[in-house]
Image (spheres, grey):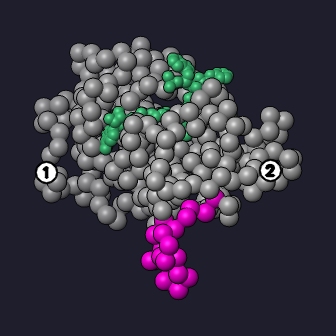
Amino acid sequence: MASSAASKPSVVDPTDLKSFQDHLKNSKRILALLGAGLSASSGLPTFRGAGGLWRTHDATELATPEAFARDPGLVWQFYNYRRHMALGAKPNPAHYALAALAKKRGDEFITLSQNVDGLSPRAGHPAETLKLLHGSLFDLKCSSFFCNHMERDNYTDPVCPALAIPTEPGTDNPIDTTAKRDLDISNISVPLPSIPASELPHCPTCQTGLIRPGVVWFGESLPGKVMDDVDAFFDSGEQVDLIMVIGTSSKVYPAAGYVDDARAMGARVAVVNMDRRDAPKSGMCEGDWMFEGDAAAILPELFREEIGELKEEDMKDLAGN
Ligand code: BV8
């Protein structure tokens, strides 16, 4: 990857950039904690974007087993909508820059993602060092406590016919599908049909349980294997040199707690966020960096010295979009 830094105007303070790149160069063990802000430039709404609401519902309230038990049709419309949006989106240069750094650094660089949108995997981020703390929109599992049916990487859109996103009248003609315009069901003014459980996907294994998205809902524990891998990285007892906190409001636990755990292992903290007020709970300490702005513009610059210039041909969306 030829590097001609001159092409892109710098979006980072040169002094901070130099000190960060020097530290990155001398860092052996690195962590990154990712949040919804990473995918903002791919056009995906963040959790707190739109006031954290989906239609009139608090998104964190919909992301609970209680909401699914109460109205699985509504919760599936919420997740089917997010699958549809994520499938229509593309990884951005921040996803590719992280993937390129991960390919170079191997298992000394572990990325902890709170995102369920599948964009980091689509940018080619190596699966062995990408820990999906909160699961994936594209995994499906049985909601019955007694059944452990799990289907990974299901990209069917809609998940089932009843969840098809309504289209604008007159735009759904079979000949020219490009004219089709979805109605934005995240907007309260668009009527949302109520979908009975009988029309929702059921578990092919136990035949009784409803299928649910393979994400971690509030009140649920994180995937055991993922937690073990993260604990193994921390329990090696070796110093952690750097943690990059990218596009997250650091409000959800245990994910947000890893920043302090890394700091306790000697790490300096580099925050990349559109809003400098969204610093980690423990605040910013001497030697930390706050890079305020768009992750899609900042990450390629922060990593340029190590990964070179990101070229169009290097940014291949593995979903082939
Ligand atoms: C559990 C999947 C226990 C589903 C998600 C300790 C203290 C307090 C509370 C708790 C605690 N421990 C546990 C809790 C309870 C709870 C919790 O943390 N509650 C919070 C709300 C206070 N945690 C849990 O319930 C966890 N489970 O603890 O289980 C247990 C243990 C054993 C046995 C049984 C139970 C599970 C939490 C996971 C929930 N699932 N997602 C779904 O996605 O639908 S969380 C979900 O919300 C996301 O994954 C993410 O984690 C979070 C959203 O946060 P962000 O990603 O940061 O997004 P946000 O919109 O907030 O911010 C975006 C940021 O980007 C902003 O800062 C913005 O400025 C910035 N930005 C915007 N544009 C850009 C940008 N930055 C850069 N560039 C841009 N262009």
Residue contact at pointers 1 and 2, CB within 8 angstroms = no
**Residue located at (58% from left, 45% from top):** 136
Element under disc 2: loop
Q: Nearer the viewer, residue 78 or 187?
A: 187
Work out whether residue 145 can be spotted.
Answer: yes
Q: Position of residue 60 (x, y in %)?
A: 53, 33
Q: Position of residue 25 (x, y in %)?
A: 28, 34
> Which quadrant, please, contains the N terminus?
bottom left
In this picture, which residue range is highlighted in magenta? 163-182
Q: Is residue 318 above or below residue 21?
A: below
Element under disc 1: loop
Disc 1 residue type (three-letter): Pro
**Residue of label 1:** 9
Q: Earlier in the sequence, mark 1 or mark 2?
A: 1
Q: Is residue 321 above or below residue 237?
A: below
| Mark 1 closeness class: few <14, some 14–19, many ≥20 residues within 10 Å | few
Marks 1 and 2: which is nearer the front?
2
Q: Is residue 233 above or below residue 59?
A: above
Q: Position of residue 203 (x, y in %)?
A: 80, 50
Name the side, left or right, on which 148 lies relative to 157: right
Q: Which mark is residue 63?
A: none
Work out whether residue 247 can be spotted.
Answer: no
Q: Position of residue 247 (x, y in %)?
A: 36, 37
Q: Give the overall secondary structure of the magenta segment.
A: loop
**Residue of label 2:** 203
